[in-house]
Amino acid sequence: MAHDPSRDYVEIRVIWKGLGVTAGPLLNVYDILDDSRLRREFLEGGRLEILASFLSGYSFALTVHGANEDFALDPAGPFTNWLSWKYGTPLTLGWVSAVERLTQENESEVESFFRLLDAFREDP
């Protein structure tokens, strides 16, 4: 999709298991992750590795297309730093390892990711 410089965002379209998500314009990664249909897809059968791969591809696409987005979910990004500061997880292993360590009993790793990401976003 070509970037229209007259807009201050790049419209994002996500195809996940044949599900086209185009609510709004989707302005950033949080719009995608907050979309209830996509979140449900990740929660119902998703594994943390698949979510991490999706986010890695998203980060790569931002770089390739020169999109200006504060992306906190790179392996050494602000989310990893916050998890380390808040919970003492090692920085060197990235957020995936931290989420795996912080997953509670009776909680999937993907549920843990969304719980921790929501707390990260709420923390001033």
Image: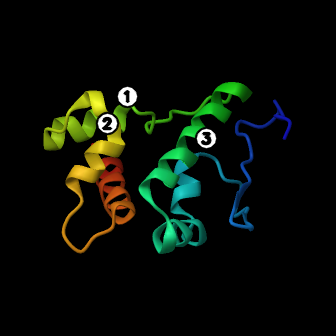
What's the residue type where badge 3 is placed?
A: Tyr
Q: Name the residue under label 1.
A: 76
What's the residue type where badge 1 is placed?
A: Ala
- The Cα atoms of the two marked residues, 3 and 2, are separated by 17 Å
Pointers 1 and 2 in contact (CB under 8 A)? yes
Residue density around tag 1, few if under 14, some if 14–19, many if 20 or more, within 10 Å: some
Residue 123 can be seen, yes or no: no
Residue at image location 58% in from the left, 35% down from the top: 59
Q: Mark 2 points at which residue?
A: 80
Quarter location, residue 87? top left
- Picture quarter with the C terminus: top left
Which element carries disc 2, helix, strand or loop? helix
Q: Mark 3 points at which residue?
A: 58
- The Cα atoms of the two marked residues, 1 and 3, are separated by 15 Å
Position of residue 23 measured from the top left corner of the image (x, y, whole percent)? 69, 64
Position of residue 20 measured from the top left corner of the image (x, y, whole percent)? 75, 65
Residue at image location 57% in from the left, 55% down from the top: 31
Which element carries disc 1, helix, strand or loop? loop
Q: Which of 40 and 29 is in front in this view?
A: 40
What's the residue type where badge 2 is placed?
A: Thr
